Image (cartoon, grey):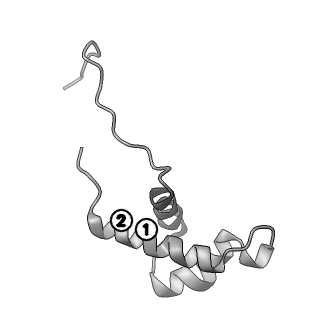
Amino acid sequence: MRGINKNKIELAHKVKALVDAHYEEGRQDRCKSAVFRNVVRKTYPMSIVTFFRLLALAEGKRKTYTPPEKNQLSLF
């Protein structure tokens, strides 16, 4: 499996910085979806799914590749 492109990681950190600057917990007009609609999408055009993937990448919650065990059978 290939690693993540360094440009994608930089984009994730830039998006995270925008969210940190505009997100306020508990306010409906400053929730993450509203920040995406009003700030992030105007700066970096992307879908909301990509937005949440980038946030997970920047926060370190992204799943990483784990190689199969030695005793695990492979289809290929």
Q: Is residue 25 above or below residue 66?
A: below
For the N terminus, the quadrant is: top left
Residue annotated with mark 2: 9
Label 2 vs label 1: CA separation? Answer: 5 Å
Give the residue displayed 53% in from the left and 62% down from the top. Answer: 52
Secondary structure beneath label 2: helix
Residue 38: horizontal and vertical position, in percent? 62, 84
**What residue appears at the point 45 percent right and 49 percent down from the top-left corner?**
62
Residue farthest toward the left in the current orientation of the protein: 76
Q: Amino acid at mark 1?
A: Ala
* Quadrant holding the C terminus: top left
Q: Secondary structure at mark 1?
A: helix
Give x and y (percent) for residue 39. Answer: 58, 84
Q: Identify which residue is drawn at 24% across, 21% down.
A: 74
Q: Are marks 2 and 1 in contact (CB under 8 Å)?
A: yes
Tell me which corner region of the image, top left, top right, bottom left or bottom right, holds residue 24: bottom right
What x and y, as percent, mark residue 48? 54, 68
The residue to which callout 1 is attached is: 12
Nearer-the-camera pick, 50 or 70 = 70
Relative image position of residue 2 (x, y in whole percent): 23, 49
For label 1, the crowd category at 10 Å Cα-Cα, with few meaning under 14, some 14 to 19 and many 20 or more, is many
